């Protein structure tokens, strides 16, 4: 069973309002075992609405639309559906009475214009709306030579749309689907290599048509592998995904750091708590990002012993009194090392992270950012490439520091290039 979600409204098509309904409905349809094939967004044009509904009815089995069910002239969903299937509109007196009663309960008289909200395409069924004046539309459309298409139109107001989905639409789709089927995802988070390099490490896993499928997405240098399986229930899906997940972990090793909502800082915080260790951070290039993330990931007293933002060599020299900084430049490895060792001692932490400034030519192919991690046994002096889009330069560097700490906590050695 394939579905299309249609979001309707000039305010959405022009970007004035964020369409969160489509995301929510896509998640709910997937939970029901329905493959969401299309997302469509259209403005308040009758011709465009008719064209989109016609296309959707032709190419999918379930259409769920939101918006366009109000009483004003730009609310066109009822008429668009009617024209798309070649029928007229008829008034449902029971729905009209419900709308009148809702106004009465709120101490208001119903404007006559609201009566159009009780008009439905011939053959459609009203979807009750307990919280608003716009009943939804359900329509079962027979198609020649193949199965039917079910169209559901709901209000765009989430507080109305969600209960209507749960009480009426979801049960109807589940019944139409017949045999039990769910779709479940499992997300494995990775860091430390590029997208194409990671894909090359997973031969045959990301090919089209594979079951279960494996998708790959990248955000701020974090790579997410999404395993998707369909089955009669959650357990069947989990069992189907397990061999693929095991293969990913075997092939990627420590590149795979967590699952679902895990971020590098949450994994580090978890490892530090398990080992009863603390960390302190003195950072320049990342501007306090590492400290901020760690502070959010776990109680400060349990994990983050202290955090400092470095703004100049003079400031760092005043804090540390280290003569090694006399002839240094902000991006030198000595800056990261002095910062890491000083912050560890200053607050009595088990680990100290020091991050130097970005080099002057930070986008060059040879540009490196220096990061040092002071541990009880020794200090690791690391250099990482920092050429990247300006929007992710700081966050990528912060993740490089957190990933290096993670590997040390796992008794692994982060790769050092200097």
Image (cartoon, helix red, strand yellow):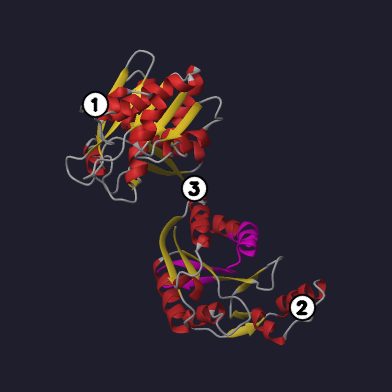
Q: Position of residue 373 (x, y in %)?
A: 35, 24
Where is 348 relative to 229, above or below?
Answer: above
Front-most of 182 and 270? 270
Residue 181: mark: 3
Residue 154 lies in what quarter of the image? bottom right
Mark yes or no: residue 6 visible: yes
Magenta span includes 159 = yes
Q: Secondary structure at mark 3?
A: loop
Q: Position of residue 30 (x, y in %)?
A: 48, 52
State the CA–CA distance, disc 1 to disc 2.
73 Å
Q: Position of residue 92 (x, y in %)?
A: 68, 80
Camera-nearest label, 1 or 3: 1
Q: Residue at x 33, y 41 (%)?
A: 396
Which residue position holds label 2? 100
Q: Mark 1: few, some, or many residues within 10 Å (few <14, many ≥20)?
A: few
Residue 329 lies in what quarter of the image? top left
Which residue position holds label 1? 416
Magenta span includes 101 = no
Task: Give the residues in magenta.
Answer: 140-169
Task: Count the numbered circles shown.
Answer: 3
Camera-nearest label, 2 or 3: 2
Pointers 2 and 3 in contact (C-beta within 8 Å): no
Where is 11 relative to 418, above or below?
Answer: below
């Amino acid at each position: 069973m394939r579905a299309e979600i249609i979001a309707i409204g000039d305010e959405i098509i022009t970007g004035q309002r964020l369409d969160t309904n489509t995301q929510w409905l896509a998640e709910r349809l997937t939970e029901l075992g329905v493959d969401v094939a299309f997302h469509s967004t259209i403005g308040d044009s009758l011709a465009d609405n008719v064209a989109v509904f016609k296309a959707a009815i032709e190419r999918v089995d379930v259409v769920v639309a939101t918006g366009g069910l109000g009483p004003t002239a730009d609310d066109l969903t009822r008429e668009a559906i009617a024209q798309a299937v070649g029928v007229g509109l008829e008034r449902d007196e029971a729905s009209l009475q419900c709308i009148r009663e809702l106004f009465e309960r709120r101490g208001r008289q119903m404007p006559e214009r609201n009566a159009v909200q009780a008009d439905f395409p011939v053959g459609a069924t009203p979807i009750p709306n307990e919280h608003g004046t716009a009943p939804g539309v359900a329509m079962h459309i027979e198609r020649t030579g193949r199965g039917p298409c079910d169209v559901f139109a709901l209000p765009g107001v989430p507080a109305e749309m969600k209960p209507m989905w749960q009480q009426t639409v979801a049960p109807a789709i589940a019944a139409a689907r017949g045999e039990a089927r769910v779709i479940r995802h499992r997300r494995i988070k990775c860091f430390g290599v590029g997208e194409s390099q990671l894909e090359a490490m997973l031969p045959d896993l990301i090919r089209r048509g594979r079951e279960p499928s494996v998708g790959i997405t990248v955000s701020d240098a974090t790579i997410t592998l999404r395993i998707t399986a369909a089955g009669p229930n959650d357990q069947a899906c989990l069992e189907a995904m397990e061999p693929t997940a095991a293969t990913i972990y075997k092939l990627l090793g420590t590149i795979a750091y967590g699952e679902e909502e895990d971020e590098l800082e949450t994994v580090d915080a978890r490892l530090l708590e398990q080992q009863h260790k603390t960390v302190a951070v003195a950072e320049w290039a990342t501007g306090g990002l590492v400290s901020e993330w760690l502070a959010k990931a776990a109680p400060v007293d349990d994990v983050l012993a202290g955090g400092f933002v470095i703004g100049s060599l003079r400031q760092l020299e005043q804090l540390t009194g280290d003569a090694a900084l006399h002839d240094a430049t902000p991006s030198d490895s000595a800056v990261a090392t002095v910062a890491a060792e000083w912050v560890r001692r200053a607050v009595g932490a088990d680990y100290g992270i020091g991050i130097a400034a970005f080099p002057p030519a930070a986008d060059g192919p040879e540009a490196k950012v220096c990061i040092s991690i002071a541990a009880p046994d020794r200090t690791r002096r690391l250099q990482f490439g920092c050429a990247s889009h300006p929007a992710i330069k700081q966050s990528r560097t912060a993740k490089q520091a957190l990933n290096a700490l993670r590997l040390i906590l796992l008794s692994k050695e982060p790769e050092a290039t200097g």
